[in-house]
Image (spheres, rainbow, N blue to C red):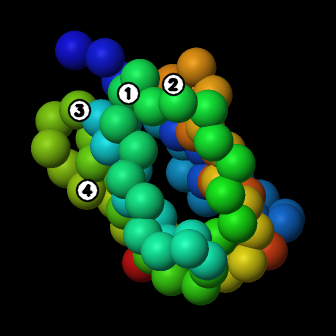
Amino acid sequence: MATLSVSVVSADREIWSGEATQLIARTVEGEIGILPGHEPLLAILARGEVRVTLPGGEKITAQADDGFLSVENNTVQVVARQAGLV
């Protein structure tokens, strides 16, 4: 099963990183879902939740305010001005 390598960071620290099967985030253009094999993307984050589904089905939720999300080669980076686990 293909996975994503995900990193969620705030301005001052890493919030969470690891392997995931799916990531859902809120951008200024609406909510977006990222699965393995997604095309390269750079999006501006809106205030809201970033939901990560782990390979075992467990879900991790972080609150992210202002920043961006990038996707390339099954690597997803979420960089927010402020972020924290919910």
Q: Quadrant of the N terminus?
A: top left
**What residue does disc 1 label?**
36
The amino acid type of the residue labelled 2 equals Asn
Q: Quadrant of the C terminus?
A: bottom left
Q: Which mark is residue 59?
A: 4
The amino acid type of the residue labelled 3 equals Pro
Between discs 1 and 3, the one toward the N terminus: 1
Of tags 1 and 3, the one toward the viewer is: 1
Q: Secondary structure at mark 2?
A: loop
Looking at the image, which residue is at 37% across and 53% down? 33
Corner quadrant of residue 12: bottom right
The amino acid type of the residue labelled 1 equals Pro
Q: Secondary structure at mark 3?
A: loop
Corner quadrant of residue 69: bottom right
The residue closer to the viewer here, 84 or 3, is 3
Residues under numbered marks 1 and 2 in contact, where contact means CB atoms less than 8 Å apart: yes
Q: Which mark is residue 55?
A: 3
Determine whether 65 is above or below 71 in the image.
below
Residue 81 in the image, given as x and y percentages of width and height: 79, 74
Q: Residues within 10 Å of mark 1 (few under 14, many from 20)?
A: many
Residue 13 in the image, given as x and y percentages of width and height: 77, 59
Q: Which mark is residue 16?
A: none
Determine whether 86 is above or below 17 in the image.
below
Q: Residues within 10 Å of mark 2 (few under 14, many from 20)?
A: many
Between discs 3 and 2, the one toward the N terminus: 3
The amino acid type of the residue labelled 4 equals Lys
Distance CA(mark 4)–CA(mark 2): 18 Å
Distance CA(mark 1)–CA(mark 4): 16 Å
Looking at the image, which residue is at 37% across and 27% down? 36
Q: Is residue 63 visible?
A: no
Of tags 1 and 4, the one toward the viewer is: 1
**What residue does disc 2 label?**
74
